[in-house]
Each structure stands twice: as C-alpha cells, then as structure tokens.
Image (cartoon, rainbow, N blue to C red):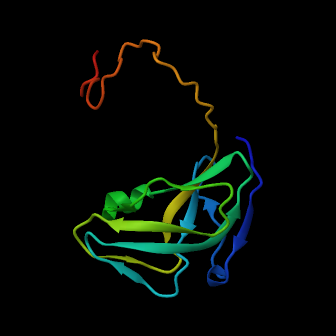
Amino acid sequence: MKTLRVAVRRLPHAAELPLPAYATPDSAGLDLMAAIDAPVAIPPGGRAMIPTGIALALPPGHEAQVRPRSGLAARHGVTLLNAPGTIDADYRGEISAILINLGEAMFTVEPGMRIAQLVVAPVVTVDWAETEDLPETLRGDGGFGSTGVRAEG
C-alpha cells in the first residue's frame, strides 16, 4: 500500500477526540467520529448533519470520500444521505456526515461515536473527445436491468 501525507487540522470542538484512524492494517477507510458535545437523536426517517471536528488539505489530484459504516447500516438502518460524500482537494472546511435513519427506531449519536469512514483516493480528470459514434460493445445502450438478475453458469 502507498502512504499519502495529508495535512489535518483538529478543530477546537474535537480537541479530546483522536484523529481518524484505520481499524485494522488492511482497512481502506479511516473512522470518522462525532465531534458533538451532547447526544443527537435521529428519529426514523430523520436526518442530522454531524460534525467530525477535522478539516483537511488534500494534495492536488486527490479526493476524500465520506462513506457509511456497514455496522450502523446493518444494525440500525443508519447510513449517509449523500453516500459517498466527496471532499475536493481545494475544500478547507470541516468535514461533516449527513446521517439518515432508515431504521424503525430512534437512533442516538453519542459524542465520539464512529459515524462514517473516510477513503482518500487519486482522481482522474477528463478531457472530453466529442464524437458522433461510440465503439460497439456486447451491452450496447442497455440500461437498468439489461444484464439480467441471475448469473449464467
């Protein structure tokens, strides 16, 4: 794995929280924590923007994606409203996670709770080559569901 040095600023309301970290050596995402002073209750169908207490200076040519935590989704029906949320290299504000409760019970975000994960990745930019015709493929212009629902074996 390649290591990328990223400048991070811990904001005053996150002074007691550790910086985002990988849970295991092979984890792709760093855990983001709730930088809140008091619990935040999210009713079923409700949403809340939860601050993480950090701001980044990503190197040019990189982005960070804020992604859901699978355990929150599986156990509580809590996920991110705009998954993945994109953090551009030129953004310097606080990273927040927009949590939505798709579960059937009230969900409470506690201070310091791991609420999302952050994946940093390189970005490829596009240089459009406008054309009248595109190369043929087996799928062609088949859209949603065009490849079927069962694997052929």
Q: At 74% across and 57% down in the image, what residue appears?
A: 6
Using the image as rendered, state which of residue 34 and residue 125 is in the foreground: 125
Quadrant in which residue 49 is drawn: bottom left
Residue at horizontal 41 percent and vertical 55 percent from the top: 70
135 shown above or below 93: above
Instruction: Say which residue appears at 63% left-offset and 77% top-offset.
Output: 17
Residue 47: % across, % down = 35, 71
Q: Residue at x 58, y 24 (%)?
A: 129
User: Is 4 left or right of 41, judged from the image as shown?
Assistant: right
Q: Is residue 123 left or right of residue 131?
A: right
Q: Position of residue 97 (x, y in %)?
A: 48, 66
Query: Which quadrant of the structure image shows residue 55?
Result: bottom right
Q: Is residue 40 left or right of residue 123?
A: left
Residue 35 location (% of width, % of height): 55, 78
Q: Which picture quadrant has residue 123?
A: top right
User: Residue 76 versus residue 97: which sits nearer the camera?
Assistant: 97
Q: Which part of the image, by quadrant, shows the C terminus?
A: top left
Residue reaching furthest to the bottom:
38
Q: Residue furthest left?
A: 104
- Name the spot of residue 121 as percent of width and height, x first: 63, 45
Quarter of the picture holding the N terminus: top right
7 vs 22, left or right, is: right
Q: How many marks?
A: 0
Note whether 33 is above or below 58 in the view shown.
below
Q: Nearer the viewer, residue 135 or 105?
A: 135
147 vs 96: above or below: above
